[in-house]
Image (spheres, grey):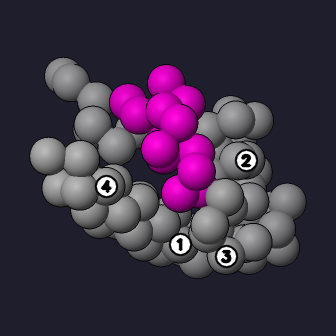
């Protein structure tokens, strides 16, 4: 199946997206970096950050939603 558009943009290191990533809270940014740049799994990220796996999962989902909303706003402003 097709990858989520937000995930595609993260993997392509889209300029607007990475600009938004730099604006995230430090722990949110770290999760994105560990997951998408370093290629760690949620379990490994949990160990690295000393969080529960469920907290990493929740933060990851919340960060993706936040980035999606921000990118949608950027897209609306560029119309």
The CA span between labels 1 and 3 is 11 Å
For mark 4, what is the residue?
Answer: 74
**Residue at image mark 1:** 59
Helix, strand or loop at label 2? It is helix
Taking the spot 48% from the left edge, 66% from the top edge, the residue there is 63
Q: Residue at x 74, y 60 (%)?
A: 30
Does 73 appear above or below 5?
Answer: below
Residue 26 left/right relative to 76:
right
Count of labels in the image: 4
Q: Earlier in the sequence, mark 2 or mark 1?
A: 2
Residue 77 in the image, given as x and y percentages of width and height:
23, 56
Q: CA distance from mark 2 to mark 3?
A: 14 Å
Q: Position of residue 7 (x, y in %)?
A: 39, 38
Residue linked to disc 2: 34
Q: Earlier in the sequence, mark 2 or mark 3?
A: 3
List the residue tagged with mark 3: 25
Q: Secondary structure at mark 4?
A: helix
**Nearer the observer, disc 4 or disc 1?**
4
- Where residue 69 sits, quadrant-wise, is bottom left
* Left or right of 24 in this view: 30: right
Q: Of residues 45 and 24, which is closer to you in this image? A: 24
**SS under mark 1:** helix
Residue 1, placed above or below residue 62: above
Between 30 and 68, the residue placed more toward the observer is 68
Residues in magenta, as a range: 8-21
Q: CA distance from mark 4 to mark 2?
A: 25 Å
Whether residue 68 is visible, yes or no, is no
Q: Are marks 2 and 1 in contact (CB under 8 Å)?
A: no
């Amino acid at each position: 199946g097709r990858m989520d558009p937000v995930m595609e943009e993260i993997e392509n290191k889209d300029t607007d997206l990475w600009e938004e990533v730099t604006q995230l809270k430090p722990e949110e940014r770290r999760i994105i970096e560990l997951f998408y740049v370093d290629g760690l799994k949620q379990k490994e990220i949990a160990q690295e950050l000393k969080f529960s796996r469920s907290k990493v999962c929740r933060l990851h989902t919340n960060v993706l939603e936040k980035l999606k909303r921000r990118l949608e706003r950027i897209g609306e402003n560029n119309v």
